Image (cartoon, helix red, strand yellow):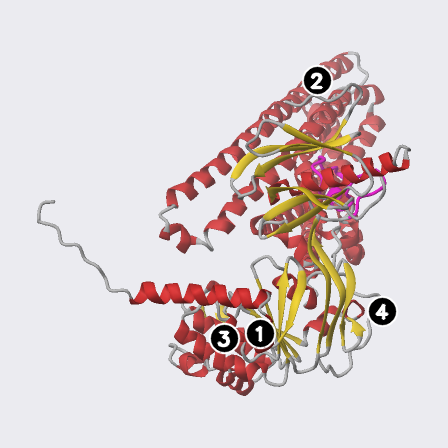
Amino acid sequence: MHRLHPGETLEAGLELDLDDTLRYAGGLLAVTDRRLLARLPGQAGWREWPYQAGLRLTHADHAGVGSLELLDAAGRLACWRFTLGRDPAALRLTAAFERQLARHLSGQPAESPRTEEELCLKCGAALDTEGACPVCARESDAPPSPRALLRLGRFARPYRWPLFWGFMLTLASTAAAMVPPYLTMPLMDDVLIPYQNGQPINVHQVALLLGGLLIASVLAWGLSWAKTYILSLVAEHIGSDLRTTTFEHLMGLSLEYYGGKRTGDLMARIGSESDRICLFLSLHVLDFATDMLMIAMTAAILFSINPWLALVTLLPLPFIAWMIQKVRNRLRAGFEKADRIWSEISNVLADTIPGIRVVKAFAQERREARRFRAANAINLTVNDRVNRVWSLFSPTVTLLTEIGLLVVWAFGIWLVSENQITVGVLTAFIAYISRFYTRLDSMSRIVSTTQRAAASAKRLFDILDHTSSVPEPASPIRLPAVQGRIELSEVAFRYGSRPVLRGVDLAIAPGEMIGLVGHSGSGKTTLVNLICRFYDVTEGAIRLDGIDIRQLALAGYRRNIGLVLQEPFLFFGTVADNIAYGKPDASREEIVAAARAAHAHEFILRLPHGYDSLVGERGQGLSGGERQRISIARALLIDPRILILDEATSSVDTETEKEIQTALDNLVRGRTTIAIAHRLSTLRKANRLVVMERGCIVETGSHDELMASEGAYWRLYQAQARNIDEETESNTAPLRVEHKPRGQ
């Protein structure tokens, strides 16, 4: 192990995991304040390069392999390779090298400049002045605060008048519920106790008191029903608005957001989390408001009857408040973790159920069952911890209230013996106290539901707080009649911290067909995603008919683009609905015409219900070629000016490819077309071929021109031709059968 010199400090390090032949082997790179150190993979010795003028360390990646090259004026000094899992560390090491080299050349301590590399390694957002990512900070692991529930106020604002009347009904119903205990005082002191002492019962007075009790009870019931109905209705509307707003916001986010999320987690947030908030608003908030009013009114009545007895009644309150404060933080963190674990369970379901054919094909049912069992076991453990805290808290509150009631009985009996209060007053006091402590116990239980609802609100607002990396323009330019001219000027793009495209210049004329070719990872699909504006360029600009596409409204721009993917996605519904997905108001005649042009009409008529036949989830029940032709019909129906074909025929057999190619010929006619294909033979009809390598355009021209130049395209074509010849030979070779004697 190389030892640092005295006073030398280590600035950054990278653990290498590939050697020059791309085999797994361990090595190390280190940047100090004096030099660059390297221990080559598979070797024990160290090499070093002191900082000097002309020294450069460059970073690149291609097809899942990253590389660092050390260069000087004479050429390359060394090259190290690693898997892309080490890429964040490689970027940090490169930035540290540049800072230390600048410090050495300037002779002064170098500041940490805000370079393009200082981005969040998780999401790619620019770091703030303190080196923190403002995007990732929105979804931090910090425990949720009940203040998150206050943010629901904007969803409640449209229903302020129903909420106001609901609150007034709550006040009235609580006041009506306060009347019966108060009427027990004259019933005891003026009727029952005098009767025990030999006086006759005043029937008229008894009738009035009992009538008052009945009216108060019926009134409290009616008012309580009305306020519960109104507030529950409002809560359901708020929950519905919350779900709709969250889903609509989710639809507006860019593909970059979905790349870091799992389907089950997002489903759990919009589904179960919003349901929990709705339940909290419709039941628990209503109960909490009623409890607060009941406690306030009861305390006022108790103090008006006997202040000293009221003070004794309130003795348990400080202890209960202290316990709530102690328990709240532990419950808050526990419920947040429980929600995250529940999302993991949803993720397992979302992964397994759509992929059930793969699960069964590879006989992995037990493995998936173990995954679910493991996630469920963690969920059980987390909830057990929360329940241990809660199970101790709730009975303790009940015990304190029972002790408080006992103290009131004792003190009240002493006051009666001293003739300071009557038996009727004590009876009314006990009735009020029972209600008071019942409400107090109910309020203590709302701690749990509040923390759960706060955790749910935080997870929903994590979505609502996320801004799209592909924003709508503030003042969009109205799109005129689209001609289809596409221009890319010095376009660069990076996924997070990994550069993918660099300096791409390309002009596509209206109606021209461009073929994009290159190795996997060369940037073809990324280029198409930028043209569709699924992502925004990091540098440069993309223009449609001379207008920067970032100045156009997203929906209006994308309506001019037809997209046919390698793996077409069909929704659950009828064949007609899937064809008309981009134009829901299309007539049946338009749908049939699009299907005919896509050579899909014949097989659709062979389905049990023709165009009204149901398509299973993700197109199950149809072959790959049939799904692709429905996808082509879907693109034809919207009549786009720009057409993008992303490996449209790569996953089907040769016979089906011919049928799809015929359909594509109808689709591309008169449209600006960008086609990606691995089978170079499918791009013969392209006006130009654009060859990409490592995020750059290296060649453009027709098939004949590129073959004549014997460059990158020629090498691709020759390699593919050799593969085809080898496959043909293996398929046509005679089958050799070795006969063995029986029994061997």
Q: Which residues are magenta?
A: 126-147
Separation (CA) of disc 1 from disc 2: 106 Å
Mark before the other along the chain sequence, 1 or 4: 4
Q: Which residue is mark 1?
A: 708
Rendered location of residue 65, percent (x, y): 59, 47
* Few, some or many residues within 10 Å of mark 4 (<14, 14–19, 20+): few
Q: Nearer the viewer, residue 503 or 564?
A: 503
Split into 4 quadrants, where in the image is the C terminus?
Answer: top left
Mark before the other along the chain sequence, 3 or 1: 3
Residue 282 seen in render: yes
Separation (CA) of disc 3 from disc 4: 36 Å
Q: Are marks 4 and 2 in contact (CB under 8 Å)?
A: no
Q: Which residue is mark 4?
A: 475
Q: Nearer the viewer, residue 209 or 619?
A: 619
Rendered location of residue 128, percent (x, y): 83, 43
Q: Is residue 142 magenta?
A: yes
Rendered location of residue 103, percent (x, y): 86, 35
Q: Which residue is mark 3?
A: 630
Q: Tag 3's secondary structure?
A: helix
- Can you tell which quarter of the image residue 51 is in? top right
